[in-house]
Image (cartoon, helix red, strand yellow):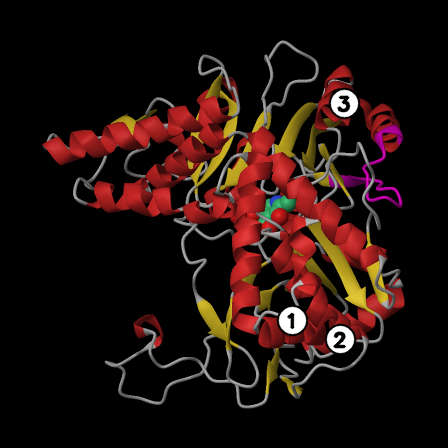
Amino acid sequence: MLLDIENECQVLSDDSKEGLIKQCNQYYITIMTNHNFRKDIAGLNIKVPVIGGALHDYINFDNAASTPPLKCVWEILEEFKDYYSSVHRGTGYKSIVSTRAYDLAHEKALQFVDADPEHFTCIMVRNTTEGINKLSRRLNLTKDDIVLSSLMEHHSNDLPWRMRARIEYIEVDNNGQIDLEDLRHKLTKFGRQVKLVAISGASNVTGVMPPIREAARIAHEHGAQFMVDAAQLAPHRRIRMGKPSREDAIDYLVFSGHKMYAPFGAGVLIGPKSLFKQGDPDLVGGGSVNYVTLSQVQWAHLPDKEEAGSPNVPGAVALASAIDYLRKVGFDKIAAHEKELTKYAFEKFAKLDGVTLYGPSRWIPGQDRVGVISFNVDGVYHAVTAAILSFEGAVAVRNGCFCAHPYIMRLLKISEDASKKYRDQINAGVRSEVPGLVRVSFGIYNTKAEINTFFKILKSIVNRTFRGKYLMDEHTGQVRPSGFRFPEKLRFLRNENHKGPTRRSHR
Ligand SMILES: Cc1ncc(COP(=O)(O)O)c(C=O)c1O
């Protein structure tokens, strides 16, 4: 097969081999998807140092955290910067242009998910977390109301509900899939007390995609509303809100620009206008009003009512540009490429002993999922595995609990007592034993050759043949090779005007 040339071309020098593999991968992606994703992403030609001083191509398998920017997003912002101005109230030409660009970003976000603009409004927020927090405040919940979320949720789709309502968790089965029977059971048990079912469109721990249409239908049949946390779904699959009259429609949707190649601090909350027309907005101030007297306030029309203060216009323009790109390329191609990578990675994991996978442990034909895989190398602490991948292969992964502590504790079968012990250790400033996993997550531009490199380093960890010596900072839990230094040439890492002692990190 095209991509297994690595073993076939032993006669070539390492440099020629690397060049050939890169070219083949490029052709492979282009042939498979008829689209050269790699040329569209910024920063892919950056080499980073590994142990021994060599420079390696950076491999980003941490897309579930944040994706690198699309070049077209930078280019649009480059063009936009000359027109950037305050929005909505200015009469200057640039202000009028900026206002149109900002409003258009809202329109594009609605179109992106087929949301009927007569029914839905799009509120620009910073990210998914802010969107869910806002929704939790605007739903006017009381502690008697129940929100049904699931056991696999990111904290951002758990803690906001805990603060304002009673939360109950839908069970997750051994394959990491939401248990729809348990959803039905809880909806029946709690009846009209359940105001909302809020689940993620794809797990940031296992990549599993819950059947959101079916879950929406069940929620609506029982009189509850339905929200999807689409932070992990929006970059990978086409989402449709659905006609509001349909049982399987989505009522509320949230997603983040920085996970879909537009890292400029904008995200989106989409929901029915009827909710946000009622009552007072959660954040008030300039921009959110039509008219104010000393005793009265008349709120602005949507979405302005819900976007108090000067908004992040470049962020919205960037998000709109990423949306344009994803729609133009098409989710069929994106999904086909990412599934191919995920299947390939699972095949490689299956051939490697000494690694435990969490969630579905193999590629299941016909089951849709996004390219997120979590694992541990048996007997090696997750932070050490992640550090070796980074400092010996330039492979960026994530380790820890991925802001889903309860789910990770469940996957690792950690008892309440053990969990309490770790909590006490953290409170005492010791993070060197905190349990966790290692996660790889793929984006549109990743390649099978990158997966090969990842497995080469992973094997060296399994076989304990890695090269470096690694030190852990007990307080942060971070693992670095001894002698690690930040590069001095990077201007954004300098602090030349600061006279006092420099702290290594503010964290
Ligand atoms: C499933 C899920 N929901 C919510 C979030 C929070 O997203 P953000 O940090 O953009 O607010 C994340 C982030 O990783 C996530 O994976």
Residue 137 magenta-highlighted: no
Which residue position is annotated with label 3?
Answer: 214
Q: Report helix, strand or loop for mark 2.
A: helix
Mark 1 touching mark 2, by CB under 8 A? yes
Spatial separation of the CA atoms under disc 3 and disc 1? 39 Å
Say few, some or many: other residues with alpha carbon within 10 Å of mark 1 (under 14 / 14 to 19 / 20 or more): many
Task: Name the foreground residue: 7 vs 232.
Answer: 7
Say few, some or many: other residues with alpha carbon within 10 Å of mark 3 (under 14 / 14 to 19 / 20 or more): some
Mark 2 or 3: the one toward you? 2
Which residue position is annotated with label 1?
Answer: 389
Spatial separation of the CA atoms under disc 2 and disc 3? 42 Å
What range is drawn magenta here? Answer: 167-181
Give how far across and how far down residue 449 sits, in percent: 62, 57
Q: Is mark 2 within 8 Å of ligand 1?
A: no
Type of amino acid at the residue the image marks with label 3: Glu
Mark 2 touching mark 3, by CB under 8 A? no
Q: Report helix, strand or loop for mark 1.
A: helix
N-terminal of the pair, mark 3 or mark 1, is 3
Q: Is mark 3 within 8 Å of ligand 1?
A: no
The residue at 57%/66% (across/down) is 17
Give how far across and how far down residue 26 sits, in percent: 53, 49
Which residue position is annotated with label 2?
Answer: 461
In the picture, residue 478 is in which quadrant? bottom right
Say few, some or many: other residues with alpha carbon within 10 Å of mark 2 (under 14 / 14 to 19 / 20 or more): many
Q: Report helix, strand or loop for mark 3.
A: helix
N-terminal of the pair, mark 1 or mark 2, is 1
In the picture, residue 294 is in which quadrant? top left
Question: In this rendering, would 140 be left or right of 101?
Answer: right
